[in-house]
Image: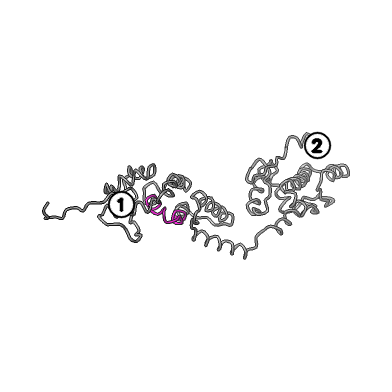
Amino acid sequence: MSMDDSQSNPINISNSIGSTTRIPILYTQDYEVWTHHFEDYVIGSEDNGYLIWEAITVGPFAHSSTSKIVKTQKEYNQLVNDVKDIPQDEKEKFQCNIKALRMIRFALQSDTFRLVSSCATAKEIWDRLKELYSTDEDLEHSIQTLLLSEFGDFKQKPEEKLIQAFDRFNHLLSKMIKHGIERKVIEQKVTFMNGLRPEWMVVASTMKAHEKFKSYSLVKLVGILKSHESAVSKETNVVSSLGSLALISKGKGVVEEEEELELADYDLSGEEYSLMVSNPRKFIKRKFPTNKNRNWQGSYSSEKVKEEPKMGSKS
């Protein structure tokens, strides 16, 4: 290849995986994903992309008359000098051998390159990488089983902030996709929200019941939940506040034991839902008006509460 040819087809190296204009770098933990992105890159890199890919995965092209395999530019120049009238299509295939070796080497980090540096062709490197990093089928099945169990049992950890739980859940989804496991968006949303700590129960349940829940992405839902976090973690959480105030509004005394709040008893309008999202405390006060002698958490104030006169009693 001449200097002009190399400059007209520069090979760009990127640290990211998935670009169709830059060589995807192999990170060994993402080998399976890398193979797909590398194939896309090679095939789309130029008009002879399919021939380059064939040189990588099937093997290098050999000279039809001498069966000589060209692997480097030096060997190509030597063959052209020694053998006259080589067909143009064969010359192009020899160049594909050279480009294939160059591309796959450029996709490797230093530590990985050292492990395959003795390989003479792109095909040898390709096969060696597969031996080193491809996942065994039995092991893959075990990994899939483990990931599915982790997905089904996902729970927010004690003291774990909402965004930390979401990052951990999102990382789990990424690992599942890497190992060929995909779940519908609705299943992802429900699993995440069901896994939140009990103090999120009312907010999460109300959101799941809302008409917009189906159209919202998981990221959008987490953003809405995030707007509640300070109210949930401050003083008392939203769950205990709603629960105690709801019981008070029904005329019950101080709650001795925790009781779950049934959302069916508190069907929210669109306006109420919006208020709950934007201002939880104002929503609580409006939805569950309290006795003037109780504070917003539902506890008695220091002022002594006078008994209401009984029906029929004399004033």
Residue plotted at (36% across, 49% down): 210
Amino acid residing under circle 2: Ser
Q: Is residue 167 left or right of residue 43?
A: left
Element type where label 1 sits in the image? loop
Q: Is residue 107 left or right of residue 224?
A: right
Q: Main secondary structure of the magenta part?
A: helix
Residue placed most toward the observer, 281 or 191: 281
Which is more foreground, mark 2 or mark 1? 1
Residue placed most toward the observer, 102 or 264: 264
**Badge count:** 2
Q: Is residue 244 left or right of residue 5?
A: left
| Residue at the disc numbered 1 | 300
Residue placed most toward the observer, 115 or 23: 115
- In the image, is residue 86 part of the stretch drawn in magenta? no
| Residue at the disc numbered 2 | 2
Rendered location of residue 153, percent (x, y): 49, 61
Image quadrant of residue 9? top right
Image quadrant of residue 265? bottom left
Mark 2 or mark 1: whose residue is earlier in sequence: 2
Rendered location of residue 296, percent (x, y): 33, 48
Q: Quadrant location of the N terminus?
A: top right
Marker disc for residue 281: none
State the extent of the magenta-drawn residues as a range: 190-207
